[in-house]
Image (cartoon, coloured by chain):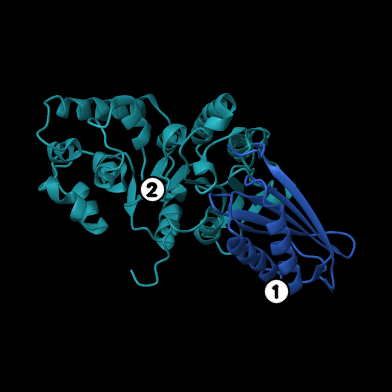
Amino acid sequence: MSDVPPGIETLDYRFAGERPAGEFAPVLVGVVGSGNLEVLLEPSPGGDCAVHVETSARGFGRIWEAVVRDFHRRHPLAGVRLSIHDMGATPAVVSLRLDQAAQELQP
Amino acid sequence: MTGALSYAECSARERLARVVDTGSFHEWLPPAERLTSPHLAQLGVPSAFDDGVAVGRALLDGRPVFVAAQEGAFMGGGVGEVHGAKLVGLLRRALRERPDAVLLLAESGGVRLHEANAGLIAVSEVMRALLDVREAGIPVVVLIGGANGCFGGMGIVARCADRVVMSDIGRLAMSGPEVIEASHGVEEFDARDRALVWRTTGGKHRWLTGDCDVLIEDDVAEFRAAAIEGLDASRRVTLEALEAENTLLADRLRRMAEPSEGDDAVALWGRLGVAHAERVSELDVASVRALRDAKGVEA
């Protein structure tokens, strides 16, 4: 038996951005399916990159932090909000989805 | 088939973007509105920003249509409270604004069991709203070709529509294979027997029995062409139409009154006049289409 309580775990991260994303239409990539996730990327006031995660896989906060920090190193976006609904995606899948969302901002 | 893009492998939003005119889809209640399920989080299940369905208006061959696309990868396309309310709202808005047609890109296992009663009520509201739209002379066209098929309450919704378009790998039925096996036993129906599942729910079977109106390949371009063809497919709900449907079903039952040796689906095709019914599973879509058009098949 696991001592991790049931239910959704919520995680929040915030980074100081470097590259202002400006105004853009919200971007949705991925699907909330088994081993998959959806990422909603929206403009947000201020110069930060805020990340909000809701996941059914509890107890992986440290891995999420590493994956999200790694993403921010590749794409130091400023003035954005990333919202994630996760259903047990692996770190590699999460990284790819995050990159896919950032890619959608390219002209 | 070179260059064909599999409809089954596309997400709901990818299908939407390619079935309607490029760039014409305008979404109502888009993901950023965060109209999510009020029930799932309590059960430890993540929500989806669109609750598994995208609805909006678009142009199809230059003509105004309303359109909904269900995402089968999220909870099997199950209809929850919000998901159902979005479908009902779309249909009721169609009564007011009178688009040329309503397209439903269905992929669903039926009611989302996590939201039991709310989902059941939602599906019944979808049926009522759909029949109102038909009664108003606006055709409702259902496209079925997703990997999850169209089952349960959504299977009934599909058969309430003016026109049903299916690919050969699409599936349409009431109870899904696992449900039948659980309630009637594996001797009655082995849900792991994929050939059996497709013989009894797949596009070819639905075409030969007259339960779908168009049978196509698993190709997004073919779904788009079939949707355009459906723009003027309005069939008013009349007493005559209902009686004809009843006659068709009674006739099907009568043909199956005698027990069959071997497979029931193959026996039914044969009794409907299909020559060499045992070969249907191996035939390509064009050949199966020709079977129903051929003399003798009363679909």
Tell me what residue is drawn at x 72 percent, y 74 percent.
A74
Quadrant for the C terminus of chain B, please. top left
Q: Position of residue B97 (x, y in %)?
A: 64, 42
Mark 2 — on which chain does it sit? B
Mark 1 — on which chain does it sit? A
Q: Position of residue A93 (x, y in %)?
A: 58, 62
Q: Position of residue B10 (x, y in %)?
A: 48, 58
| Chain letter matching colour blue | A
Question: In the displayed structure, would residue B40 be above or below residue A92?
Answer: above
Tell me what residue is drawn at x 67 percent, y 71 percent.
A103
Nearer-the-camera pick, B164 or B136: B164
Give me the disc on residue B165: 2
Locate residue B109: give its quadrant: top left
Give me the disc on residue B284: none
Disc 1 + disc 2, Cβ < 8 Å: no
Q: For mark 1, give the secondary structure.
A: loop
Residue wearing tag 1: A106
| Chain letter matching colour cyan | B
At label 1, the amino acid type is: Gln
Nearer-the-camera pick, B247 or A83: A83
